Image (cartoon, rainbow, N blue to C red):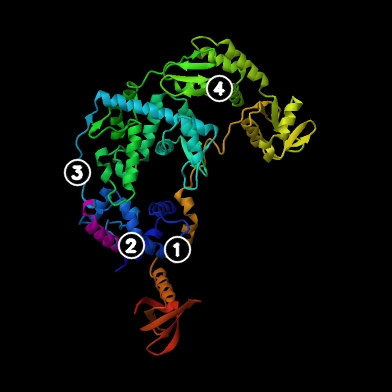
Amino acid sequence: MVSDERALATWLAGRDDGDLAATLAARGVSATATWNDFFDAAEALLDPASVDRALARLPRAALAALSAGEPAPNPVLTRLALAADDGRPYAPTAERLAALTAAHPDAFGTIALAPSRVPADDRAAAAAAERAFTTAGSLADVLLAGLHVPLARTGAGSVTAADRKRLTEAGAIRDDDDLEDLLAAASAAGLAVPVERHWLVTDAGERWLASPTAERWAGIAEGFRSSLPVGLRTPAGGVSDPATWTTAYPLDPDWPDRVARYRRIGRQWGLLADDPAEFAWTTTLREGAPADPSGLAAHLPAEIDRVYLQADLTAIAPGPLAPALDLRLRGVAVRESRAQASTYRFTAQSLGAGMTEGETADSISAFLSTLSLTGIPQPLAYLIESTAARHGLVRVGLDAATGRTRIEAADASLRDTIAVDQALRPLGLLPDAGGLVSRAPRDAVYWSLADARYPVVALDDDGAPELVRRRTGTAVPPAPPTPSQTYARLMGTLRGGHGTEGEEGWLGRELEQAVRARSEIVVVVRMPDGSERAFTLEASGLGGGRLRGRDRAADIERTLPVSSIISARPA
């Protein structure tokens, strides 16, 4: 009878690289595992501790299938290397299953049917829509902050304390959980991704910022559904009844925290109501159809497209400003109050920042003329013109002859101020033919000057002004490695080890293990005359196609050709 370890080794060796990598990833195997062949892999995957970890990650339905009396093919369990193709659990799986069933009998029963969903009342629907509107505004603030200065991450993956403080002071978040939940929702929808030590806003995130609130919600809703684990999804691609979520992964010790986050995010975005109520706009999501925000939109406050510009250099929006207009207005003004009615203030710094991002005096004036219900007050018009006149007094480009970054300023006193500015010392600025040069990259010099409040403009290779966006990465982040890429080295090692076809691979495995443990084994050898003879040896070495060991019965050292060994078993 073929052992489970041997059967699993043969099964693993028969997978193509994609399927094999998927199994290794699903079992949480380290890419640096020190396995030498598929027999090592099978032994490790059938280790009781490894089986326990795999069982803990199974949803209740899979656990119930495993504990069923009669084996039945189950692709999920087979892919996880917990059961054979016919659905029969491997012996270590069955043993750990029996132990866990005794310790957690409730984990292996089927889930009781949840009560039928009932429509949420108008008051609950209105409150949920208001929460979704507020949460969308908070995420917009976080993404906008990350678009200008990417949020830094600690080694543990959380946003740094400095950036949390910055967002809290700006009114974007109230506490740490808010930020983590917002970023989790953004990541699920593809709006922001963690790349190395920063959160980067993607191109999809930039488009989301300019979208109406209803479209923003639909993008988040689709991402939320796709991010739910398989235990919360239906075969039709929908979502299981939220009343059953708490018990979906009964053996996972981390599940209570995970499901609490899913519920919290769902409530923030108006996706989950109090059981057994359901919002009209989430029925399609639960059934597997695309998100339909029309029901939610009916409860959202109407977005406006006009503001009042005041002589005190402020703009007052009497209602929620359309996101695309709000986004552009905040590019040239500082938002002072955050509510359905918001106040924005124009300053020389805010207008200069907008010009740094590509605005001009004409484009700002044209935008405000179409946005304002009261025209452009004279003090604001003067501020725009004076800021534009000053903007670009400092120019940063590349010196074609030396390849260094060159700074030029029309005002010699301004150039001298830059040369002695202590905040710019890391740039290593040196005087050169009426300008300053640095070995630092052009963009680094540009943003150092911009952060120090100098009226700087970047020049392209032809000397024309060029828009520079502050990024620590690309708008389209690099795709994460596939399982096949992650496990390429390990799979190469496994395929280069002992083969699993016939008896040779298994025999080599048995002999190597015996030598490593210096254990006694019984080897059956085919003699030159065709007869077979058994020897009991204490295996001591294997190499050059020969097995060495001490024959205890004859008290001699024997060397046997491996090619003549028919079988080996423990003594």
Mark 2 residue crowding within 10 angstroms, few (<14) / some (14–19) / many (20+): some
Q: Going from the N terminus, do you reach mark 4 or mark 3 first?
A: 3
List x then y, in percent, for residue 355: 61, 23
User: Residues in magenta?
Assistant: 91-106
Three-letter residue code for mark 4: Val
Q: Which residue is mark 3?
A: 112
**Nearer the camera: disc 1 or disc 3:** 3
> Label 1 vs label 4: CA separation?
59 Å
List x then y, in percent, for residue 157: 47, 45
Three-letter residue code for mark 1: Trp
Q: Going from the N terminus, do you reach mark 1 or mark 2 first?
A: 1
Q: Which residue is mark 4?
A: 332
> Label 1 vs label 2: CA separation?
17 Å
The quadrant holding residue 283 is top left
Residue 379 in the magenta stretch? The answer is no
Circle 4 SS class: loop
List x then y, in percent, for residue 487: 47, 54
Mark 4 residue crowding within 10 angstroms, few (<14) / some (14–19) / many (20+): many
Q: Which residue is mark 2?
A: 48
Q: Which residue is mark 1?
A: 35
Please give left or right for residue 161 compared with residue 270 in the image.
right
Q: Are marks 1 and 2 in contact (CB under 8 Å)?
A: no
Circle 2 SS class: helix
Circle 3 SS class: loop
> Label 1 vs label 3: CA separation?
43 Å
Q: Going from the N terminus, do you reach mark 3 or mark 2 first?
A: 2
